[in-house]
Image: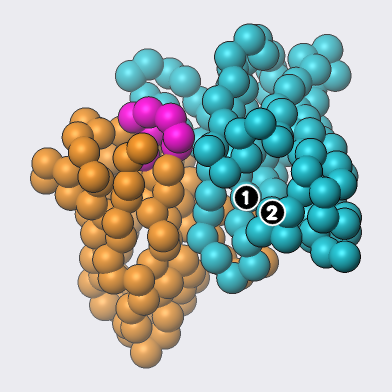
Amino acid sequence: DIQLTQSPSFLSASVGDRVTITCRASQDINYYLAWHQQKPGEAPKLLIFATSTLQSGVPSRFSGSRSGTEFTLTISSLQPEDFATYYCQQLHSYPRTFGQGTKVEIK
Amino acid sequence: QVHLVESGGGVVQPGRSLRLSCSASGFTFNRYAMHWVRQAPGQGLEWVAFISSDGRLTYYADSVKGRFSISRDNSKNTLFLRMNSLRAEDTSMFYCAREVELWPHYYFDYWGQGTLVTVSS
């Protein structure tokens, strides 16, 4: 099975900060990686698929990139509504594994 | 618009069974593969099971293989998860999710709001 390791598990940031979350895959998954955002009491919401393609309606301050087996989610200027937990997910093979999550909290 | 509505959760004793449903609307259900994903209280997301658009192909997480069974009724736009031999560690919010299979892209684009399963004596 492909393992996804996110870092950090928790980060504290202020509105306006640039935030970067990393997801490392245990083997090559090409560009088959998505990012989901989940707020407390809500279902996950797709932000990015295929490493860097923004889902319709997602603000352009979100972006994704890849270097080998390391993937990055960047929020260019953190907004109050962005405080949430973020999960990466690989869609290269089954099982469709998720990273353990990164919780972004207000500093 | 796309709607996925889960139901069937509740409190069940260890060793018993439960069947979850996911009612789909707003899209052509029989054109999409579907998944179940669960989340234990305070924990992360765990993928559970997959079923192809025509129902012929299924995959399961090792943690549920042999105990859970995913199925669908395309005539009723409904996805199911039959859960047998339930354990305390199965206590979770269960979400259904739609997968887009638009080669070369694959992604979960819509999620239901979830149904809570609590396994407790």
Badge 2: chain ID: B
| Tag shown at residue B90 | 2
Where does residue B116 sit, x and y in percent of width and height?
77, 56
Q: Which residues are magenta?
A: A90-96
Where does residue A15 sit, x and y in percent of width and height?
35, 81
Where does residue B91 sit, x and y in percent of width and height?
72, 59
Q: Is residue A97 magenta?
A: no
N-terminal label among 1 and 2: 1
How far, Cα to Cα, is label 1 from label 2? 9 Å
Position of residue B57 relative to residue A87, above or below, is: above
Please state if B70 lies on the left or on the right of A62 as rendered: right
Residue occupying the point 67% across, 46% down: B95
Toward the viewer: B7 or B46?
A: B46
Q: What hue represents chain A?
A: orange
Q: Is residue B19 visible?
A: yes
Toward the viewer: B105 or B34?
A: B34
Q: Quadrant of residue A21?
A: bottom left
The residue identified by callout 1 is B38
Please state if A102 lies on the left or on the right of B97 as rendered: left
Q: Amino acid at mark 1?
A: Arg
